[in-house]
Amino acid sequence: MCILILHAILRVMQIAETFWLVLIVGSVGGLTIGYILYPLLLVLFLPKRASLIPSGLTASVTLIIPAWAEKDLEVKIDETQALDQMGIDLQVIVITDQASPKNLPPNFTWIQETARRGKSASINQAMKSVRTPLVVFSDANTCLHPSSLVHLLAPFQDPRVGAVAGEKQVRLVRSTAAGEEVYWKYESVLKRMDASLYSVISGAGELFAMRTLLFEDLPNDAVLDDLEMSWQVIRKGHRIAYAPAAIATEAPSKNLKEEAKRKIRMAAGSYQFLSRHALSHFFGVSRVFGWQFIFRKWFRWVLAPVFLLIILLSSVGLLLIDSPSAFSSQLLFLEALFFTVALVGWMLLGLRIRIGWLTAPFYFLFMHGCQLRGWIRHVMGNQPVTWEKSERSRMS
């Protein structure tokens, strides 16, 4: 109804087509700058920062594994014991609702929780027992490559490095993971460029390390603990390095419904973070980091969903034009083609047919749809810190 009223007013003013075209072209241009032009400029002009090779590394580190109602916690414990250490003194803290198993290795500390308070509260509790200069966080449902630990700790040889982000990979076991796999490959490229420019913006909870002295108690209601910890490191003048060889593998969500749960929760947590930290804070650390945050986070959380909504509504306005110009007709055709490809991608997912590049347009729209739903959840105050866990496909 609002579109019809606005279109009628614009038609009387004889600027309807121009108005809708400006909105569409401007929004498409904004998306292009954020998702294509900015990364392209970094690829063309950024020097590559050489990865530090683990060599004679000696360190004392504590690995914290928060786990609540995890079915395969024993697998994670066995996997942790099998990690290559190369002279690293490794202590492990498991904080969970489950009782301690028999014959627990001597370097393991088991903290049993009786009430679910959220991951941030669990991390705060576990950190009270940390006595090592470095601490690593890893989710219980994440599979670590045997050499992940040594690669993750290597960048700490640089005293300016306050934290290190590992490499998250999604193991493709179902066709529903095709779009997610493409997305995380894109993210990996951007993280490498972030590290070369100044710093990775945020590590992922699947595998993240930091200097213990930089840690501060997280707000117990923090939805995205990894984002909060990353900001603790950055605002104290350190940078977050990237260790692509420190691989953490995760199974994809069981289906789109389960993936939506995770995406909406992450979006709600993103808006919670923005509501607590002004943009001026990020520029206060460094102008370079401020612009990094604008293009890598703020753009995605604030501008991109709005751009997509404007494109959709403006396209409806163009369809109301009696005699559209050739340019308008071509633009509508390209939009229709994009949405058709997205629809085909969604249908292929339903048929369990894996064609990653064809499902990417659907995943792009799906991701931003979840972003809008996450914003609504944040505004309504409906995102609990003890979020509902997403079911994942089993990794073979």
Image (tube, rainbow, N blue to C red):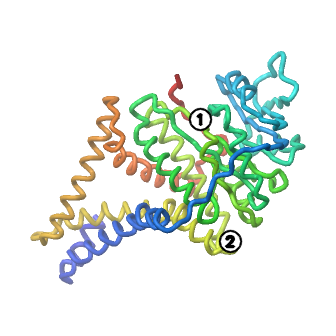
In the picture of the structure, the residue carrying the numbered disc 2 is: 281
How far across and down, in percent of the image, does residue 250 sit? 56, 34
Residue at 52% across, 22% down: 396
Which residue is at the front of the view, 199 or 282? 199
> For the view shown, which residue lies furthest in the top direction?
102
> For the view shown, which residue lies furthest in the bottom direction?
13
> For the view shown, which residue lies furthest in the front direction?
55
Q: Is residue 86 above or below residue 77?
A: below
Residue 323, by quadrant, is: bottom left
Q: Secondary structure at mark 2?
A: helix
Residue at 75% across, 26% down: 81
The quadrant the N terminus occupies is: bottom left
Cα separation, mark 1 vs mark 2, equals 32 Å
Which residue is at the front of the view, 35 or 73? 35
Residue 359, by quadrant, is: top left
Q: Secondary structure at mark 1?
A: loop
How far across and down, in percent of the image, does residue 163 sit? 72, 53
In the picture of the structure, the residue carrying the numbered disc 1 is: 389
How far across and down, in percent of the image, does residue 71 sit? 64, 23
Residue at 81% across, 55% down: 216
Q: Is residue 297 above or below residue 347?
A: below
Tell me if mark 2 has few (under 14), some (14-19) or many (20+) residues whose alpha carbon lies within 10 angstroms of its own: few
Query: Closer to the observer: label 1 or label 2?
Result: 2
Which residue is at the front of the view, 141 or 161? 161
Left or right of residue 126: residue 25 = left
